Image: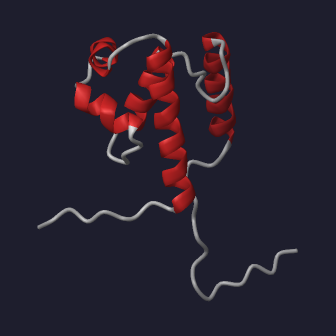
Amino acid sequence: MAKRTVPLRPHVQDALSVWGQLIRRGRLDRSWTAKDLAARANVSEQTVLSAEAGHRGTAVGTMMDLADLVGIPLFGIEDHAEIAIRRRRGEEMLALLPSRVRRPKAGTIDDDF
């Protein structure tokens, strides 16, 4: 059975393309070949080229690693310690939220004002 691919929304594909362009520009600014960046990221040269082309199949973790290696700040944050602080803050906030979302049973009316 063939794998079904759901088309990306246009703005998401545009964002992947921009991300790939930033990675390529960062690589070229460092005078690295795609093979050089691939070796640093421990991925194949083809993976680097796919990421730079904005292909949807490149794992988001790989895209982030490539971006970090060429000096693109993740989430616009240059300080790695700040990213860790924000991760912990997010974990604390999520711990306060319910772990599940439950839908009310059909036919029940919430009239408790």
Instruction: From the top left corner, tell me how far across and down residue 100 is, in percent.
Output: 55, 54
Relative side of 32 to 78, left or right? left
- State which quadrant residue 45 falls in: top left
Q: Nearer the viewer, residue 80 or 16?
A: 16
Residue 78 is situated, as x and y percent measured from the top left of the image, at 65, 16
Q: Position of residue 40 (x, y in %)?
A: 33, 12
Residue drawn where x is 45% and y is 18% of the image: 28
The quarter of the picture where residue 94 lies is top right
- Residue 76: percent from the left, percent from the top? 67, 26
- Quarter of the image that includes the N terminus: bottom left
Number of marks = 0
Q: Residue at x 60, y 13 (%)?
A: 80
* Residue sitting farthest toward the right: 113
Work out which residue is located at the far bottom of the displayed protein and give it.
107
Q: Quadrant of the C terminus?
A: bottom right
Q: Quadrant of residue 91?
A: top right
Residue in the foreground of this view, choosing between 78 and 14? 14
* Relative side of 38 to 10, left or right: left
- The single residue placed furthest to the left in the displayed view is 1
Residue occupying the point 42% across, 37% down: 60
Please name whichever residue, 9 or 111, is drawn nearer the observer in this view of the structure: 9
Position of residue 8 relative to residue 39, above or below, is below
Up/down of 2 relative to 50, above or below:
below
34 vs 92, left or right, is: left
